[in-house]
Image: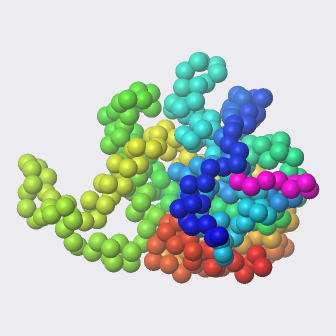
Amino acid sequence: MTATIEQVQARRPDFEGDFLIDEVVPLESGEVLARPTQHYAIYGKLNAARDNAVLVCHALSGNAEVATWWPQLFKKPGGLLDLDRDCVIGINILGSCYGSTGPGSVDPETGRPYGPTFPLINVRDIVRAQEKLISSLGIRKLKLAIGASIGGMQVLEWAVLFPDRVARAVSIGAAPLGAMGLGLNHLQRQAIMLDPKWAGGYYLPDDEPHGGLAVARALGIISYKSVPLFEARFARNPNRTGENPFISAVAGQNGRFDIAGYLDYQGRKFNERFDANAYICITRSMDTFDPVRAHASPYAAYSRIQAHVTLVGISTDWLFPPEDVRSLAAIIGAAGARCEYREMASIHGHDAFLAEPDHLVRLLHPIFE
C-alpha cells in the first residue's frame, strides 16, 4: 500500500532525542558555546554497515522532523528517499528555537536565558556540531546530504569541511548572499529591534515583540516569492474580507489590498511558532555564510570536495538568483570537483522547494538512478 502525504506527515520519527556536546565549543567568531545540545530525529534504521545515512538540513524556520515539512521526499512511488532502504536524519540547527541550544536556552555562566547575548553562530559552526552528532551514531560517511536555503548552505559546508564524510551533496537555492539579500535580512532584524517590546532582546516570554517579528516575517515572505506569483494570486484586488482600500476604515488607516491581508496573516501565524531572538540569530548565520572564508582561494576551498555535488537554482528566486547558483556551480567545477547545475522552473520564487516539491523530486530523480 502506498503511503499518502498525510500519512508521511503524521509519521513520528523512529527516534527523537538530544545530543549533548559535553565540552566548550570554539566558534568561528572567536566566541565559545559551553556544552550545547542538538535536537535530532531519525526515520528508518541504520544498516549494519552504517552506510545508508541521509542528512536532511532544514531551512530557517524548519526543525528536525523532516517528514512534517518535506514529506514529498518520502512519497511512494517516485520519492527520493525510501525508509525501507535509507536512514534519514534531521538535526535542528544551533540558534533555533526547536530544541537545540539557542537564544532561549539557559547560559550556564549566568543561569539566565542567553537572549541577545547568544554568540554569533555561522554555518560552519552548525556543521561542525552536526559532525559530532553524526560521528556519535557511528556513521563514517553520509550517503547523501540534502537541503535548501540555509539547509543548502549546510550541505555545501559539509562537502568542503568534511570532504571524506559525504558521498553525494544536493544544495537547493543556496549560495553566499548578495547585497540585496544582506539588506533584506538587515531590515528584518531592524523591524524586530524597533518594536517597543524588544526590550534590548530581554523581552519576557509572555510579552514578546510580536509586531516586529510579524513585519520581519512579512519582509521575508516577499523575498521568498516572486512577482509573477503575487500578480497571479493577488494583483490589485481588495482584501478578501471585503475591505475597500480606497475608503477609510478607521481613523488614520485605510482598508487593505489582498496582498496586505496575506502578509499580515503570515506574520500572525509565524508569531505562534517562532522566537524573535532566534530569527535574528539565524538570519545572521545566513549572512555570514562563505565557504571560501579561511581558505586561501575558491580553488583551495572547493578542490577539497570529494562528493558528487548537485546545485539547484530556481528560475524566479531573487533572494538566491539562479545565475548566482549557476556561477557557484561553475566555480566548484573549475576547482576539479564533480558538480552539476540544474534549474527548477517555477513561479514560486525561493519557496519553490516547499511549494512545488513534486516538481523538485522529478528534477532530481534522474541523478539518483
Residue drawn where x is 8% and y is 57% of the image: 248
Q: Quadrant of residue 144?
A: bottom right
With 205 as the anchor, is 151 left or right in this view? Answer: right
Q: Position of residue 228 (x, y in %)?
A: 38, 78
Is residue 282 shown above or below 34? below
Is residue 236 shown above or below 213? below
Q: Image quadrant for the C terminus?
A: bottom right
Q: Quadrant of residue 88?
A: bottom right
Q: Position of residue 188 (x, y in %)?
A: 42, 50
Is residue 163 shown above or below 316? above
Res. 49 visible in picture? yes
| Nearer the observer, 230 or 49 | 49
Q: Image quadrant for the N terminus?
A: bottom right
Residue drawn where x is 49% and y is 45% of the image: 279
| Nearer the observer, 220 or 26 | 220
Q: Is residue 48 magenta?
A: yes
Is residue 233 shown above or below 100? below
**Count of labels shown?**
0
- The part of the chain drawn in magenta is 43-50
| Nearer the observer, 207 or 128 | 207
Q: Position of residue 60 (x, y in %)?
A: 55, 52
> Farthest residue in the top direction?
110
Q: Position of residue 267 (x, y in %)?
A: 36, 51
Residue drawn where x is 74% and y is 55% of the image: 44
